[in-house]
Amino acid sequence: MDECIERKPPNFASQHMSSSGLVYADTIRLSLATGTEVQALVRVEANGTERPKCLLLHGNPGSLLDWQHIVPRLSQAVDILAIDMPGFGRSTRLSHNAECLNLDRLAEHAIAAADALSWHEPFFLIGHSHGGGVAQTAAARYPERVAGLVLIGTLGAPVHGSYRLLSLPGATTIARLVGRMFRSNRFRPLLRKILRGVMRDIFSPEPVPTDALDRELILLSERPEILVSMVHVALGRPSARLFDSAPNIRCSTLFLHGQQDALVPARCAKSIHHRILNAGGQSEFRLVPGAGHMLIEYQATEIAQLILRTLTH
């Protein structure tokens, strides 16, 4: 295990504040062989007992804090690594080039994060939304490293509406302009209203939690460059790439998707599921009745139980 890793497992119950007031659990900086550093939460069994190992990948924008309801429900039975992917949360990106945040590059960082913990045996990838797309890419490119996939509200194909908007010409310029507004307290009330509207589809049919809205407002005010990262991950036709690479996924895959997901329709994930099955792979698709995109927030207990059943059987 690298020297930069804390020997004492971090504890979600013990929290501290950033200088801006953003609440983060006990996290560490993890140096990767890819040349970058990521903010990471590590929960491992201190006595060295062998348990299933899981890497958790958040969506777009998102951060490792998105897993705050899932981690406590999993950590009693599995070892956990959750990261802020480069360009998001507290993790910086290697360059301003959009290609540095494509699915292949993010998959390389994910594998490197597991390497940093000396997870050389096959481990499980659990991805939410865009993180599900990164997990799919890692499984297709590094089949010997991935024991299984759990894809929650995952990016699929065809491309959904918000990614069509983010990939339009001029989206990066608009993101930079809005980022400048986030740096000014003058626009804070207006930006709060806009942000709530943007988050409405993400959390629908449930309401946008006030703490989640406040957290995003603080984070984007502190790191407005995340808005550009949001655009860049949507470039390069990621949905088409996932559709093309799906037959290369050979590990067991579980799709968990909200029936009322207003952000990524279930049909997008089902297309990947069917591609895996048609190629002779193992895939199960579960539609969660009444749920939206944020299953890891509002259906955390049910989702954690399904994950544990998959990982421990």
Image (tube, grey):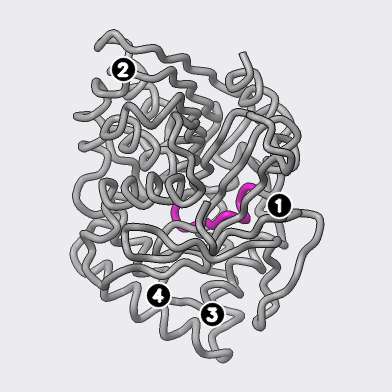
Q: Mark 3 points at which residue?
A: 222
Vertical relation: 46 (above or below) 281: below
In magenta stretch: residue 63: yes
Identify which amino acid the numbered label 1 is placed on.
Pro
Q: Give the SS element for disc 2.
A: helix
Decide which of tag 2 and tag 1 comes sooner along the chain: 1
Q: Give the SS element for disc 1.
A: loop
Decide which of tag 4 and tag 2 comes sooner along the chain: 4
123 or 58, which is in the foreground? 123
Q: Where is residue 186? Give x, y as percent.
A: 56, 91
Residue 182 bears which disc, if any? none
**Which residues, given as a range, are shown in magenta?**
60-67
Identify which amino acid the numbered label 3 is placed on.
Glu
Point 43% across, 37% down: residue: 120
Residue 225 bears which disc, if any? 4
Task: Determine the CA span between mark 2 and mark 1.
Answer: 36 Å
* Quadrant of residue 279 within the rendered picture: top left
Q: On the rendered image, what quadrant is the C terminus found in?
A: top right
Q: Mark 1 points at which residue?
A: 9
Q: In this view, does 163 lie to the left or right of 152?
A: left
Task: Determine the CA span between mark 4 and mark 2.
Answer: 35 Å
